[in-house]
């Protein structure tokens, strides 16, 4: 920044030098003629003070003054329009250098400091903006990642719920089948038990009936073996209940 400011200020410094030195260093011929005329008027006034004492000398002086005016006219004609004044140029240059030193000592450091502070502020703002942009992008990426994870979790939960529902439904069906089979087995067992009870009761009644019939037919008491044979024969004659 300093180097750039120094390079950019070179044309300005050159222009200031030309503006300061040129008008003061070059004096017009008209100004010099004015100075010569002023000296001539001063000389004429001094000659007028001595007119009463030296008339002859005044005449000579008038001729000399005429000659001087003649020479003045010739000098006026021969004087160029512009001439360089070295003394004025040196003083103007000294003044300019003093002003330049004051500016370099007090003004330019403040200007450079302000420019550097502004440059630093702009750089910090740019860095802050870049950092904020990077953080925003990172936050957006993290948020998108969380959304994707949440969507995946939702899909997983839905799949698990569907699978659990299917499994529970199958379990219910299987339990119903098992319960139905158990009830069927219990019913068959109950039927079989009832059949056995009925057969036993029927066998008892048949035995009693057979004994009574046999007693009435045979006219005697039967032994236990006879009862068993009669019961067996009666059971064989009964129709099958299966």
Image: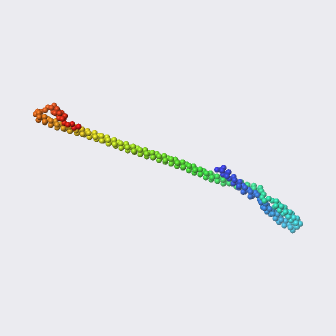
Residue 122 x/y as whole percent: 59, 51
Can I make out residue 130 in this image?
Answer: yes
State the residue at coordinates (62%, 51%): 116
Residue 209 x/y as whole percent: 15, 37
Q: Check the image and name the residue furthest to the right.
A: 56
Can I make out residue 61 in this image?
Answer: no
Residue 216 drawn above or below residue 115: above
Residue 178 picture quarter: top left
Residue 194 picture quarter: top left
State the residue at coordinates (10%, 34%): 219
Q: Nearer the viewer, residue 147 or 174?
A: 174
Residue 210 x/y as whole percent: 15, 35
Q: Nearer the viewer, residue 80 or 205?
A: 205
Residue 112 drawn above or below residue 209: below
Residue 61 picture quarter: bottom right
Q: Check the image and name the residue furthest to the left.
A: 219
State the residue at coordinates (20%, 39%): 198
The answer to whether residue 99 is left or right of residue 58 is left
Q: Nearer the viewer, residue 225 or 79?
A: 225
Residue 235 x/y as whole percent: 18, 35
- Which quadrant of the rendered structure holds the C terminus? top left
Residue 41 drawn above or below residue 226: below
């Amino acid at each position: 920044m300093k180097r750039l400011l120094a390079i950019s200020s070179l044309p300005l410094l050159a222009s200031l030098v030309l503006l300061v030195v040129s008008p003061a260093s070059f004096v017009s011929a008209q100004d010099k003629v004015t100075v010569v005329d002023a000296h001539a008027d001063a000389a004429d006034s001094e000659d007028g003070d001595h007119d009463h004492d030296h008339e002859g000398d005044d005449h000579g002086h008038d001729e000399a003054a005429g000659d001087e005016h003649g020479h003045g006219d010739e000098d006026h004609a021969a004087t160029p329009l512009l001439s360089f004044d070295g003394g004025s140029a040196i003083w103007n240059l000294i003044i300019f250098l003093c002003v330049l030193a004051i500016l370099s000592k007090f003004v330019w450091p403040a200007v450079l400091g302000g420019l550097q502070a502004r440059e630093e502020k702009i750089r910090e703002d740019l860095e802050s903006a870049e950092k904020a942009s990077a953080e925003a992008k990172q936050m957006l990426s993290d948020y998108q990642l969380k959304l994707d994870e949440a969507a995946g979790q939702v899909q997983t939960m839905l799949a698990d719920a569907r699978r659990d529902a299917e499994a529970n439904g199958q379990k219910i069906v299987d339990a119903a089948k098992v319960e139905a089979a158990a009830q069927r087995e219990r019913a068959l067992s109950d039927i079989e038990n009832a059949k056995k009870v009925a057969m036993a009761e029927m066998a008892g009644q048949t035995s009693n009936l057979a004994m009574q019939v046999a007693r009435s037919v045979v006219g005697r008491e039967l032994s236990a073996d006879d009862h068993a044979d009669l019961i067996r024969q009666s059971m064989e004659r009964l129709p099958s209940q299966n």
